[in-house]
Image: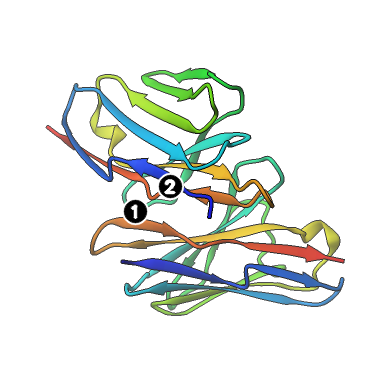
Amino acid sequence: GAVVSQHPSRVICKSGTSVKIECRSLDFQATTMFWYRQFPKKSLMLMATSNEGSKATYEQGVEKDKFLINHASLTLSTLTVTSAHPEDSSFYICSATDWVHGEAFFGQGTRLTVV
Amino acid sequence: GQQVMQIPQYQHVQEGEDFTTYCNSSTTLSNIQWYKQRPGGHPVFLIQLVKSGEVKKQKRLTFQFGEAKKNSSLHITATQTTDVGTYFCAGPRNRDDKIIFGKGTRLHILP
């Protein structure tokens, strides 16, 4: 069945470096993917909507230069956390919708720790 | 591994009928969250339940968390066309607090 694969599942990086997270839709094309961030014991917060072939739409308060999103193909969206700081440490998760079947799927999530 | 299972996968109801979706975890959850995704939209947070046996209401929506904190339900009374969408439950994984989603229940409303 359709799956959304997110990689890596866990990453530790140094302050000031950049980290790229990939979200792939397997077996279906996703013109739109969503990126979320979750703080401990909180609900998911939508960060941005990733649109294939065009610029991402960011939610209010989310820095687009800090969280770079690229959706270069119908099966891949990437989120790059640039110049990471410890406060960027969080759980990031993507979701994509298979419009043909009308089903939504979530990636496995990425635990980012910035030291 | 730890799983969150949600049933039914699909549900068609006549407008005005009630609707219930169920969520079951293979392990005890510290909390459970419910999200709704409208067609064409992104999942939106509805509610979080934390206490054993907790029941919360939001207008026509009633959320329950089981006594054992391993299951939950969302009940909609007298469905309306605006209720169309996919309802997801989600719970934190015990060992590292990552959130695990159920596969969702797609609700269709027949006029």
Q: Name the residue tied to disc 1.
A: B40
Residue occupying the point 41% across, 77% down: A75
Q: In the orientation shown, which residue stands out farthest toward the bottom?
A: A72
Residue occupying the point 46% across, 18% down: B57
Relative to A90, does residue B71 appear above or below in the rendering?
above
Describe the element under mark 2 as helix, strand or loop: loop
Q: Position of residue B4 (x, y in %)?
A: 46, 45
Closer to us: mark 1 or mark 2? 2
Side of B16 relative to B65 (left or right): left
Q: CA distance from mark 1 to mark 2?
A: 19 Å
Report the quarter where the C terminus of chain A lies.
bottom right
Q: Amino acid at mark 2?
A: Gly
Residue under disc 1 on the same chain as residue under disc 2? yes
Query: Toward the viewer: A88 or A25?
Result: A25
Side of A92 relative to B78 (left or right): right
Q: Position of residue B96 (x, y in %)?
A: 69, 52
Q: Which mark is residue B102?
A: 2
Relative to B34, does residue B1 appear above or below in the rendering?
below
**Quarter-of-image position of residue A111:** bottom right
**Quarter-of-image position of residue A93:** bottom right
Mark closest to the chain's N terminus, 1 or 2? 1
Side of A86 relative to B15 (left or right): right
Image mark 1: chain:
B
Image mark 2: chain:
B
Residue occupying the point 32% across, 24% down: B76
